[in-house]
Structure formats: structure tokens, C-alpha cells
Amino acid sequence: MDIPETKGANSSTGPVSERRDFRPQSNMIRWLRIALYAIFVVCGQTSASLLTRLYFEKGGSSKWVGSLVQVVGFPVILPYYFISQRNLVTTPNSTSTAAVKTKLSSLLLLICVYVYLGLLAAGNSYLYSVGFEYLPVSMVVLISASQLTFNAFFSYFLNSQKFTPFIINSLILLTISSVLLVANDSSERPHGVSNEKYVTGFICIIFGTAAYGLSLASQQLTFQRVLKRQSFKVVMELIIYQFLVASIATSIGFFASGDWKLLKSEMDGYAPGKISYVMNLLWTAVAWQVSVFGSVALIFELSALFSNVIGALGLPITPIAAIFVFHEKMSGIKGISMVLAIWGFVSYAYQHYLDDRKLNAETKKASEFSEA
């Protein structure tokens, strides 16, 4: 199985975009990949959010377990990663002193980057776990819409993200979409949650959302400045090592807190049964990882902001899905919110279409000039 060599990144964020392949067939395949990654993000995010809330709804009570399932799913991509490694052509390594020093320096930098991103993911997962325990699922995902604002802020400073009218329009529409749903949210707080816990959950989701926005912008910066090899292999390595660190950090918290001692009693008291308990945690971990995989791949293909917009597109879907899972009521406001979310996504996608047309025209003009 061959791994496609990807050539893109956000057209407004630096030199990576200058290496795109502008052949029509290649461009079509690239956008098909982007569509597939977007489906991964939306479906994974929706499924994971519902399953995480279901864990707490049916008797789960460990914040560390809720946090751990968000980061331990990375082994599901290991088979694909190792299979792809067999198809890579290796080149002889230089053994000069200068080359060895350069590689050692690069390795130390990579380790620091992976540790930083991993700890950020671990902290983010715990904050979201607290939010899922103390808040209704619709409230959690809709507060998460503020990640657009945080990511835009961090992308502006870290990635030199340019803001065009279409991008601004997209951010406004997606934010309004979620604000409408928050204002219309009539679901009661989970049973037994006090005012203090409710406020704690709200604050944790805000900070978790900020951490997620910073993580996306940091990953894009990593692709541009550190992982300069333009292949899909680096996407998988970033996910694997980042979440390996996150899993270790979260596991330390899990055992240090003593929650592992209560795991058996929690499993026995889980309303649907022990098998359902295990299957819930298993598929929650897989769903989170599918979402992460799609998100990081979108950063690699386009930008952190685009990845965030796709995530925001899926935010209104979760409350609608919760109608069937948790029997929440449907309202006209939720329908309007969905339309606004789709409109915002189309606005952002159209801006990237304009960017591609402009780059295609410039490349064609430069090619004609060089041939003259």
C-alpha cells in the first residue's frame, strides 16, 4: 500500500504551499482526500462526544478514564504506519561529524515538540472530561465553538494566517450558529451536579477549547518549521508520538489519583452491563482517534484554521444526534444553526478555491514566461 505524497498546506501560511502539484487530476485527488479527512473529523467528533457523555450518563464517574480514552486510541493507526514503512525507499545516511550533530540537534528538537504537544493534548483531554461529566453534551460541543476564535488568534501569531472577507464571514457564521444553539439550549444539567460543578465544567471547557486551538496552530507550525519532509508519513508520526506522550502523562494521573482502584466497582455498577462498559470505552477511544487523524491531516493539507472550521461544522450535528440518543427536543433554532454552519463552511471552502485558482494562474504564467 503506497502512501500518497502530499504537497499542500495553507496557501497563506508560507513556503509549503509553493510545492503543490497543480495538475487537474492531482488536484482532484487531493480534494477527495480533504473531503475524506473532513468526514473523519465530523463523524469521529460526533461519535466520540456522544459516547463520552454516555459513559458518565450510565454510571461512569472517573474523569481520568474519560480523559484516557481521548488519547490512547493511537495504536489503531500503527498497522497502516508499519505497512507504509515497507514501501519507503531509504537512502544512505551520512556519517560525518557535522551530519551527526545536525541529526542529534534535530532529534532533540523533535522530542521537545512531541512532549509539548503531548502534554497539551493530555491537559486538553482532562479539561474536556470534566466538562463532559458536569455539562450536557450539547452544551459542551457548543461552547467548543469558541475554538474558532482561539485558533484564529494563535494562527495569526504562529502561522501568519491571513484573514480575508470570506474567512471572517465563515468565522462569524459558525460562531453565530453555535451561539444560537447555546441560547436555545433547554436541556437540564446532569442529575446531581451542583452549581459549583456546573461552573467548573463551563470553565474547564473554555480552557480546554483554548488549549485545543493552541494545539492546532502549534501542529501547523511544526509542519512548516520542524517537520519539513512533505509526506503523509510525518502526519502519522506526529499523531503517534504526540499521543504516546499524552497517554503516558494521563496514565500517570490515572494511577496517581487512585481511580484505578475503583475501576472494577465502576464496571459492575455500569447500567448497561460490563460488556457495554468495555465496548463504550473501546469505541470512544477509536472515535477520538479518527477525529484526531482527520484533524491533523487537514492541518497538513491546508491549515489549522481550516481544520478548526471543519470541526466547527460538526458542532451543530452533535446536538441533533443527541435528539435520538438522549431524547432531547428539536427546535427551529437548531435547524437555522445547521444552515448557518454549512454556509460558513462553504464560505471558507470558497476562499480556498479562490486561492487555488490564483496559485494555478501564477504557476501557469511563470511556466509560460520560463519557456519564452
Image (cartoon, rainbow, N blue to C red):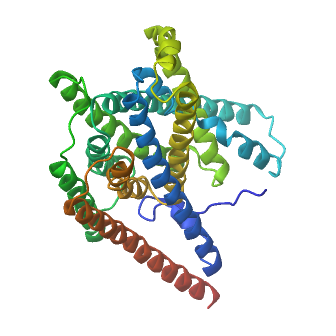
Closer to us: 206 or 184: 184
Q: What is the number of callouts on the image?
A: 0
- At x 35%, y 67%, the residue is 348
Image x and y of residue 89, in percent:
82, 51
Image x and y of residue 153, in percent:
28, 48
Side (left or right) of 184 relative to 357 = left
Looking at the image, which residue sits at the far front? 272
Side (left or right) of 108 relative to 152 = right
- At x 52%, y 34%, the residue is 280
The quarter holding residue 289 reads top right
Image x and y of residue 333, in percent:
20, 61
- At x 55%, y 84%, the residue is 364
Residue 153 visible at all? no
Closer to us: 37 or 58: 58
Q: Considering the image in quadrants, where does the N terminus appear? A: bottom right
- Is 111 situated above or below 77? above
- Is 159 situated above or below 357? above
Looking at the image, which residue sits at the far bottom? 372
Side (left or right) of 302 relative to 369 = left
The quarter holding residue 139 reads top left
Side (left or right) of 161 relative to 48 = left
Image x and y of residue 229, in percent:
64, 51
Residue 251 visible at all? yes
Q: Considering the image in quadrants, where does the C terminus appear? A: bottom right
